[in-house]
Structure formats: structure tokens, C-alpha cells
Amino acid sequence: MAKTASRQPEQGGGPSRTSLFLVGFMGAGKTSVGQLLARKLRWRFIDLDDRVEAREGRTIAEIFSELGEEAFRTAESAALSELLNELSGGDPAVVALGGGAYVQAHNANAIRASKCKVIFLDAAVDELRRRCEAKGAVRPLFQDQQRFTELYHTRRQHYRKADLHVETTGLSVYAVARQIISLLGIEKR
Ligand code: S3P
């Protein structure tokens, strides 16, 4: 069950030093919160979409339009599996996943098996849509409103399996990052 209300001390003693995975829908703030969180903790920040683009030598939009969504999902899973190998035993990092990555059962299982912490950044669907419109980043799956809303509702049940659920509606990225640090009881280096 995800935790929302209060600080949850780590089991087994001591604050978290395991990598943090930020999941949630498009516009949830995974990249902006992740970058700030990593800066505050002095941890590395990794964006899985960047890894996919580097691996494929194409932008996300090009992968979708030239190869299709299935090829994108295959590349995304391969990039995630490489990343989990890289993170095992190394310094912790803050990782932002693309909105569909955690929805794939094999990806979610691999992350859970790695014992990294998963944080669901949530927001009202209208706010997510506004943020996506305002940012102007190319998102192949952000097209019509109805599809956006349907996809959000379908995916929420998957995101809710995260260890921690943070509601971000109306909050700044600073407030969200502060809340995560406080809820996880992570010590800054
Ligand atoms: C996707 C979200 C995108 C990116 C790709 C697919 C999705 O990332 O991975 O366009 O399936 O929701 P963001 O969530 O960072 O926009």
C-alpha cells in the first residue's frame, strides 16, 4: 500500500540510500522534481527517456513515428534493464521514468526486485493536461483530450503500486521534492 500521510522510517534502520524511481503520468513532474531532488541529495539524476534516445540514436518522437510504440517499449525495457544493472551496488541515483514504463508488468517487477524505492507523483488529470500543454515538449501519446484522460485512468492503478504516493496538484517542484525527502527520511550527504 502506498503511503501518503506521514514520514515512513525505513525498515531495518537508517534512512534510504537506495535509488529512487519517480513514476506517474505525463506532466506529473518526474523530470523536474527528479532533477531538483537529485541536486538536493547530491545524487545522480537519470532520465530513462534520455537513455532510450541515446540507445536508439533517435528522439522519442522519431522512435514512435518511424518504428512504432512497440519498438519504443522494447527499447525502454532494454534501457531500464541496463540501468538496473548499472545501479546495483553503485551510488544511489534519482531516476525519472517515462509515463508508460512502470505500467509494463515486467518493468515494474524488475524495479521491485532491485529494492529501489518507487515514488508515484500524482495530480488531477486537468492539471496534468495543462502542464503538458504549457511545456510544449513533444509527447507522442499526448494528443486528444479523451484519450489522455482514458489513459490516465487506466494507468493509475499501476502507479498506485508504488511505495510512496505524492499528490502534486497545486504544488511547486520545490514543495514536492521537500515532501519526498521528508517522507523518506533521506539524509543529504
Ligand atoms: C510516454 C511518456 C513519455 C515518453 C513517451 C511515452 C507514455 O515520457 O516516455 O512519450 O507512455 O506516457 P513522460 O512521461 O516523461 O512525458
Image (tube, helix red, strand yellow):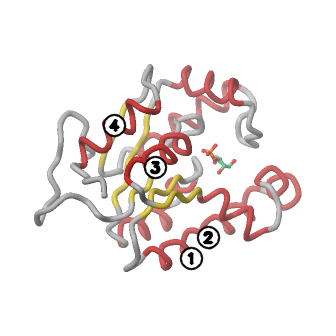
Residue closest to the far left: 13
Q: Residue at x 17, y 57 (%)?
A: 10
Q: Amino acid at mark 4?
A: Arg
Q: Nearer the viewer, mark 1 or mark 3?
A: 3
Q: Nearer the viewer, mark 4 or mark 1?
A: 4
Mark 4 vs mark 3: which is more N-terminal? 3
The residue identified by callout 2 is: 79
Question: Looking at the image, can residue 158 be seen?
Answer: no
Q: Secondary structure at mark 4?
A: helix
Q: Residue at x 74, y 56 (%)?
A: 69
Q: Amino acid at mark 1?
A: Glu
The residue identified by callout 3 is: 39
Q: Is the residue marked by circle 1 packed among few (<14), some (14-19), or many (20+) residues within 10 Å?
A: few
Mark 1 vs mark 3: which is more N-terminal? 3
* Disc 2/disc 1 C-alpha distance (Å): 5 Å
The residue identified by callout 1 is: 82
Q: Secondary structure at mark 2?
A: helix
Residue closest to the far front: 189
Q: Is mark 3 within 8 Å of ligand 1?
A: no
Q: Which circle marks residue 178 in the picture?
A: 4
